[in-house]
Image (tube, helix red, strand yellow):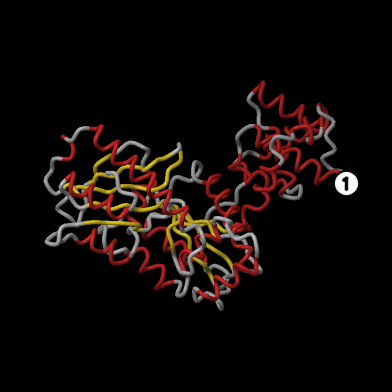
Amino acid sequence: MNSDDLDLLVRDASALFECPAMVVDMAFRVVSWHRPTDFVDAPFDASVDGGSLSYETGSVLAASDAQAHYVSLVDSPFRRRFSLLVTGGAPVGYLILVDVGNRLEFEDARRFSAVESALAKQLLLEESRGSSIQSTEESVLQHLLEGKFTDESLFELQAASAGLKYMAPRRLALANLELYRSASWSDNALRGTILDVFPMSRPLMHDGGVVFFLNSDPDRHLFRELSERFNLRVVISAPVERMFDLPQAYAAARELMELLLPRMPHPFAAVAEDYQALLQLKQLEARKDLALPSVRALGERDRAENTLYCLTLYTYLSCHHSLQETCARLYTHRNTVLYRVKRMREDFDIPIDDPNQHLALLISAALMLLEQGREDVLMPKEG
């Protein structure tokens, strides 16, 4: 393993372990591969022919940790050994070995370590050598999302040379693949469906998820169907004016996805605008001092006595002082809500009826709810 050519290193690794081998980068694009001439395997062939892993394979890799592990595929008789390639403490790609002889588990771990180290270093070196942005459709979009274009004119030149000159997406969609499982590892049913439902959306794997681009505002019904069919959790970004603004839209979509994943373990399709108030409040979460002193005192009472004053205040204000709607939202009897409102007025001197204080009270109550871990109250109702 002394070569300074990645293809030769992969060929040597294939010979050393007597099995087909493949190296992919962190975007799950096939960088190098080697297989015996008589080897036939549907998932392997599909990855080579398509230049990237299927979403199914990518979802498994994205969900795994740094430990090597074995996976059996539905549409292949051979197990795979997946391992992360790391150099200088940074992950740069993956090594995939096809265990045709069912003996890789018995190999010396030090041999794997040496091979993976050599491949990782060479992969990083060759990526550095080719650091100038390639003019392919996928590579330009990948580099755009990664924020590697600092000059809009350079981006426009690269986009034109890649055939993206007339691409004018209004939004992007980010699909999390942690729940996604398809019947086949090689047919890429999800990609095909996305292209059928959203033509010219140019889906690509990025940071362990699937990103695709929308030319119009989202049809929520179509997104709900897609998420339920493939067990996806999807975030649709806010609108953008220019393609060059997509990195900011993508970063905001990722932020919203990270917020929703632990709170919504089932498939969903979320539109950014529905959560804008929550995201803005999360930016203020550490600024407890912005809350009115009287509402902070209300929060202290909730914490000390396990009461629901802040929740009641926020709901009452959100319902524009409608007692009926407040009771309905809280599933609470009218007399209980009236009692809490009276205590807030008399015991905490909260100016609940002052229109000039409405916004300050609403924000203060929301900050207290965030402190109590009640983001669910600030989220839109599903449906």
Please tell me which residue is depicted at 51% across the width and 67% down the height of the picture.
Answer: 213
Residue on which the image places disc 1 = 356
Q: Is residue 287 rendered to the left or right of residue 353?
A: left
Q: Nearer the viewer, residue 301 or 118?
A: 118
Left or right: where does residue 339 sit relative to residue 236? Answer: right
Q: Residue at x 14, y 49 (%)?
A: 100
Q: Nearer the viewer, residue 143 or 270?
A: 143
Question: What kind of element bears circle 1?
Answer: helix
Q: Residue at x 59, y 58 (%)?
A: 247
**Residue 52 image position (x, y, % from top left):** 35, 60
| Quarter assignment of residue 82 | top left
| Up/down of 137 relative to 117, above or below | below
Q: Residue at point 43% right, 48% down?
A: 124
Image location (x, y in percent) of residue 323: 72, 45
Residue 73 x/y as whole percent: 22, 51
What amino acid type should be assigned to the residue bearing mark 1?
Answer: Asn
Find residue 208 and report its horizontal and vertical position in percent.
43, 51
Total numbered labels: 1
Give the crowd class for mark 1: few <14, some 14-19, many >=20 residues within 10 Å.
few
